[in-house]
Amino acid sequence: MPVPLPNLDDRRWADLVEEGRTLIPIHAPEWTDHNIHDPGITLMELFAWVAEMDIYQLNQIPDRHKRKFLALVGIVPEPPYPARTMLHFSLASSSTVVQLPETVEFEGADPFGVATGFRTLAPICIAPGFLKAIQLKDQRGFHDFTDSWVRGENFAVFGTEPQLGTELYFGFSEAFPQEEFVSLFFSFAHHRSDEAERCRLIDESSARQRICRTPLSDFPCPNVAPLSPPVEDRIKKTLLHHGVRLVWEILITADGDWELLEPDHINDETRALTLDGQVRLSIPSEMAKKKLGQVINELYYLRVRFVAGSYDAPPFLHRLALNGIIAEQAASVGEIKTIDDQAIEAILLGISDGSPNQKWTLPEAPVHVPSFQLYIQEEDKWRVWRRRSDFDESARSDSDFLLDPTDGVITFSDGEKGRVPPKGAQIYAIYCATQAEAGNLSSGTIHRLADSPHNRRVLGSDYEKIKESLAVITNPIAATGGAPAEILTHAIGRAIEQREKTQRAVTLQDYEVLALQTPGVQLARVKAWANLHPGLPCLKAQGLITVIILPYLPLDKPMPSVGLRRTVATYLNRRRIIGTRVEVVGPTYLEISVRTKVQAYVGANKAALQQNIIETLNNFLHPLKGGSEGTGWPFGRDVYRTEIMQVIDELSGVDHIFSLELTANKNEPQCGNVCLNPIMLVTAGPHEVEVI
C-alpha cells in the first residue's frame, strides 16, 4: 500500500479569514467594525486568498522532484521500447548460402498499412532447404510431431516426462553447408522462457560475480592477463542448465552413423531447450540422407539426445524455424555521412546559434534510446555529447544534453549547468526510430527486405543479389513487447510494487516466495520450516531454515536434482539475514496404499467403480494435485483414515464402506491414521479395492 503524504496545512480561505478576525481584538482593539463592508476586512480576505494559494503550493511535489525521489530507489521511467519478433528466411531454389550481417532492415505493415521497419540483432548464415520433419524417439519408438509443428501446436520436445536417452530428430530437405554456422530458432510455450528470464539469469550471475570479485581485480597490473574470463565466456557459462546435458549429432552415412558436434561447433543459446533463442551449428562433415522413423522420405537428419540430468518441468516447443533470428522494431534515420573517417548514417539537425537553452526536434520519433548518439563539430573536430536525465550534476565544461524520446526533442543547457553548443557548430544525430506499441504486429506481416540507405550501406553491391535470393521472409510469431515511454504515475506505481516485493528472506513466507522466483528454475511448490534440520526432524536446530522444493518432474514423485537444489540455495543465501543458515532439500516420500471393501449401489458398474476409486485415491494422495484443495498434499500433514473414507464415500455409485485400512511404505496395514514428519510428503502406492 502507498504511504499517504501528510497534509502540511489543511486550512482553507474561510479558516484563515476567521482566524484573522479572532486576532483583531488582540492586536488592534480600536478596530471594532468587523463586517464585510469594512475595507480592512476586504484586505484580510484578499490576504487569506493569497495565503491559501501558498498553502496549496506547499502541499504539492513537482514532477521534477518526484523523478529525483524515484532515482533514489533505483527507479527511472522507462523510455519507449521496440517490439521484438523472430524472422524466418528461405532461399530461392537456385541460391546457395547467403550471409546477412547484423542490423539488416526488413519491412512489414501495420493494420493501417503504415510501413514498419525491423532490424536483425545478430549476423546470420541463411542455408538452403527446409525443415521437413520433427520426430521423437523414446523407449516406445518413434513419434512423428511434424503435423503438430505445421499446425502451430505445442508439444513436449522430450515427452511429458523426459527420460534419459530420449532423442529428438530434425529432418531437412538439404544438407547444411560445412564450416558455416546455421541457425535454428526455438520458441517455447512456458512463460519463463522469454527474454526477461534470460536477463534475470545474466543479472543474477553478474551480481554474484561482483560479490565474489577479488580486491586485486579492481587494480589490474599492466601486461598481466585479467583474472576474470571475458564477458562472453561468463554469459555462456551462465546459460548452462543446472541439471540437463544435451548432445547434438548429425547423420553422416546412410548406414546410420552419427557424428557428435563438439562444443566449438555448437552454440546453444536456449539453455538446454528451456529459453527462447538460437541454436547455431557448424557442420564439420558432410551430412547423409536416410529414411528414419515414421517419415517415409529420405532426409538429412540432425538430432539432439538427452544424456544426463533431469528437467524441472517438461519443455514444450511453441515454434521452430530454420534460418530464424531475433529482430526488433527499429529503423535507422538519416543519410550516409563521414565522421572521423567512418561512413555512418546521421541526420543534420542544424547549426548552433550559440544561444543558451537551445531545443532541436528530431525528424522521426519515438527514439530508440540505446541507439542514440549526438555529434557536434567544433573547430573541425567531432565531439560526442553525453545524454543525461537532467543538468543537476553537470558542470560548465560538461558536454551534456537532455533527450525526450517520445517527442524527439533535444535540449541543451544554459551554460551554467553544462556547455552550450558553440555558434556555427553543426549538430548531427545518429539514432534509430521505433513505433513503440504500434510496432506490435501480428504474425506473417513482415515480407520484404527494406530498400533503405542503411541496407545499401551494410549490404553494398550485394543488395540486389540478396533481395533476389530471399524467396521467403516472414515472422512466424507475432511481434510483442513494444511499449510507449513510461509515464510518471506508472513509475511511481512500479516503485511501490518494488517496495512491497520480497527482496530479503526474513520470514518463512519470504523464503518460499524467493525460492519460487529463482531465475532459470521451474518449481511447483515450496515449503520453509524454521529451526528444523532435514536429517534430524525431531530436534530443534536454532537458526536453521530448511526449504523443501518440488519441481514438476518426475510426475508421480517430484524430486529436485542436485543442481536445482544448489541453484535455489545460492539464490537464497544472497538474500538471507545474518545469523541464519539455509538448507534446500527435496521431500521424503511416504507411500500410502489403501485396502478397502466397498458396497456399490444396485445396478452400478463394479469394474468402472473400482477403477474410479483407485484413480480418485491416486489424485487425492498426489504431491502436486492432491489434498482437499487439489493443490498438492500439505507438507508434513498426517493422513487421516476418516478423510480417505469421505473421499471414497462421495463417489457416485458408492453405497457404503465395509472396511478400510492404510498401509505406509508396504508395512503392515493399520486401522488408524498415518503420521508424517515436517519434511515428508505422501504418494499413492498400489491400492486393493474390492467392490461388492
Image: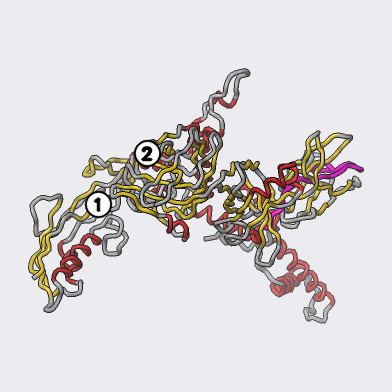
Q: CA distance from mark 2 to mark 1?
A: 46 Å
Residue 3, how many percent across, how many down? 55, 59
Say left or right for 331 vs 221: right
Depth check: give the residue in front, 260 or 564: 260
Q: What residue would you read off at disc 2?
A: 256
Please report the residue visible at 22 percent of the width from the left and 64 percent of the height from the top. 616
Can you give x and y, in whole percent of width and height, for residue 22 in the image? 71, 72
Relative placement, left or right, of 376 versus 129 is right
Towards the viewer: 655 or 104: 104
Among the 4 quarters of the image, the one containing residue 545: top left
Mark 2 against mark 1, which lies toward the viewer? 2
> Can the viewer see residue 512?
no
Q: Quadrant of residue 623?
A: bottom left
Residue 410 screen position, x and y as percent:
79, 50
**Is the magenta region chiefly helix, strand or loop?**
loop
- Residue density around tag 1, few if under 14, some if 14–19, many if 20 or more, within 10 Å: many
Q: Secondary structure at mark 1?
A: strand
- Could you say which is closer to the camera, residue 525 or residue 99? 99
Label whose residue precedes the other's in the sequence (2 or 1): 2
**Residue sitting at 79 percent across and 77 percent down?**
32
The span picked out in magenta is: 415-435
Q: Which residue is mark 1?
A: 681
Residue 637 painted magenta: no
Q: Secondary structure at mark 2?
A: loop
Q: Label 1 is placed on what type of residue?
A: Leu
